[in-house]
Amino acid sequence: MMRFGVIIFPGSNCDQDCHYAIESRAGQPAVMLWHESEDLQGCDAVVVPGGFAYGDYLRTGAIAKFAPIMQSVKRFAQTGGMVLGICNGFQILCEAGLLPGALMRNAGLKYVCKQVYIRTETTDTPFTHSLHRGEVLQVPIGHMDGNYFCDEPTLASLQKEERVVFRYSSPGGERTPEANPNGSLDDIAGICSPGRNVLGLMPHPDRSSESMLGSADGLKIFQAMVGALVRK
Amino acid sequence: MTSKHLEVNGYNPINMKAHVFVSLKKTVLDPQGKTIHSALKKMGYQDIADVRQGKFFEVTLREGLDKTAANAEVERIAREVLTNPVIEEFQYRIQD
């Protein structure tokens, strides 16, 4: 069994979605981690869920990165621990410096809530090792600030090191301007850390964990994490 | 004792204020500024060449802080908290 921890910040709103996907769909125990605690409770993996941590005041993720629990998450990530940041969680991981770049206001200036398709760009991560390269997942998004940005040297290193894990695509896996919902640089939907143990992505695997929700593709990411721990 | 009495006794209860301006780096596209610019043009303001949107913070410092310490403190919070160095830059002034 793999023990997941799901962080709750004031303003998190996908913590229960993550808990449900992990316990009821992936069949693994999940504990909730309160933002004011530094105790990761012996978890094997940490999920930073979506929502609006601390109201997203100042900037998305700007206050959350100073939370006591995030200091423990940083140490956990630096020693190889698996960390998955979804939506607001991705924004927080960027602010905290665990992932490079930043998530800016969507190019269309609107909150976008819809099903999108993402193409698996690398299987060399604990989150995607059981997928196929090029495999397209249908996963929903719901965000105002998902427009990934980084400077040119950072983008070059993400590309060279194959750290772009997911790109927005058409259902058939083609990169088109219409498939990119927010203006993200290089169609980036998700990236990983240099150690490949931290993944941040804007689309919600937690909201696509069973077919009743429109897609069960997101479950594959949680299952891959479980498989990765068993392999270790 | 009221603050008026304190002033008479030579104590200055005025707090210095810092004004911090945060804006997107010039190399970062500002879709909000672009939209405002385009709206202004449509309204007939033809003399506007560009608009960039940013944030403004008024920070009140504690009584009695000297200006050197105020500068150091404001610069630090602007760098470490108020801006994301990946996309933003800042300027500040201490008001007397």
Image: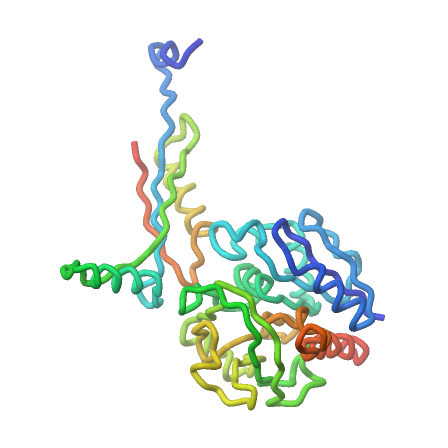
Q: Position of residue A102 (x, y in %)?
A: 48, 65
Q: Is residue A194 above or below residue A169?
A: above
Q: Is residue A10 above or below residue A225?
A: above
Q: Position of residue A112 (x, y in %)?
A: 50, 68
On screen, residue A122 versus residue A81, left or right, reads left
Q: Quick one: A202 or A47, which is closer to the camera?
A: A202
Residue A52: quarter of image:
bottom right
Quadrant of image for the N terminus of chain B: top left
Q: Which colour style is shown? A: rainbow
Q: Position of residue B26 (x, y in %)?
A: 30, 64
Residue A61: quarter of image:
bottom right
Point 52% across, 64% down: residue: A143
On screen, residue A183 versus residue A13, left or right, reads left
On screen, residue A48 versus residue A224, left or right, reads left
Point 55% across, 83% down: residue: A162
Q: Is residue A27 above or below residue B70?
A: below
Q: Position of residue A136 (x, y in %)?
A: 61, 86
Point 51% across, 78% down: residue: A158
Quadrant of image for the C terminus of chain B: top left
